[in-house]
């Protein structure tokens, strides 16, 4: 996980997961699964990275 996200990203992810009442790993897996259902593997992983960063930063 740390290879894909900066320390700042990880802090935002943890905060977003907490707001959603989920463990950060569960929160990330949910987003990655959503993307995998919609796209090819490589595109899904890239898309998941940006989706996670966006949702965490936007406090969704």
Image: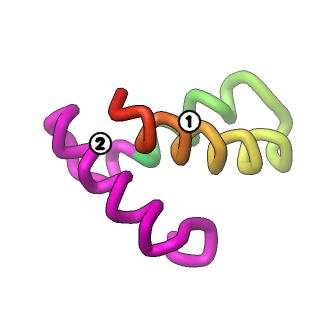
- Residue displayed at 33% across by 63% down: 11
Where residue 58 sits in the image (x, y, percent)? 43, 33
Instruction: Determine which quarter of the picture holds residue 48.
Output: top right
Instruction: Determine which quarter of the picture holds residue 51.
Output: top right
The residue lying toward the viewer, choosing from 50 and 26, is 50
Image position of 12 (left or right of 54): left
Whether residue 26 appears in magenta in the rendering, the answer is: yes
Q: Is residue 14 above or below residue 47?
A: below
Image position of 35 (left or right of 11): right
Where residue 46 sits in the image (x, y, percent)? 76, 49
Disc assigned to residue 33: 1
Where residue 17 sits in the image (x, y, percent)? 26, 44
Q: Residues within 10 Å of mark 2 (few under 14, many from 20)?
A: many
Image position of 10 (left or right of 24): right
- Residue displayed at 62% across by 67% down: 4
At mark 1, the secondary structure is helix
Q: Is residue 59 above or below residue 29?
A: above
Q: Is residue 50 above or below residue 60?
A: below
SS assignment for the magenta stretch, majority: helix
Whether residue 6 appears in magenta in the rendering, the answer is: yes
Q: Which residues are magenta?
A: 1-27
The earlier-in-sequence mark between 2 and 1 is: 2
Q: Nearer the viewer, mark 2 or mark 1?
A: 2
Q: Which residue is mark 2?
A: 16
- Residue displayed at 44% across by 42% down: 57
At mark 2, the secondary structure is helix
The residue lying toward the viewer, choosing from 25 and 11, is 11
Q: Is residue 41 above or below residue 35?
A: below
């Amino acid at each position: 996980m740390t290879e894909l996200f900066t320390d700042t990203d990880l802090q935002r992810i943890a905060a977003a997961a907490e707001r959603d009442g989920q463990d950060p790993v569960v929160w990330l897996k949910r987003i990655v699964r959503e993307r995998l259902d919609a796209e090819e593997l490589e595109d899904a992983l890239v898309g998941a990275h940006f989706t996670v960063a966006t949702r965490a930063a936007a406090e969704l």
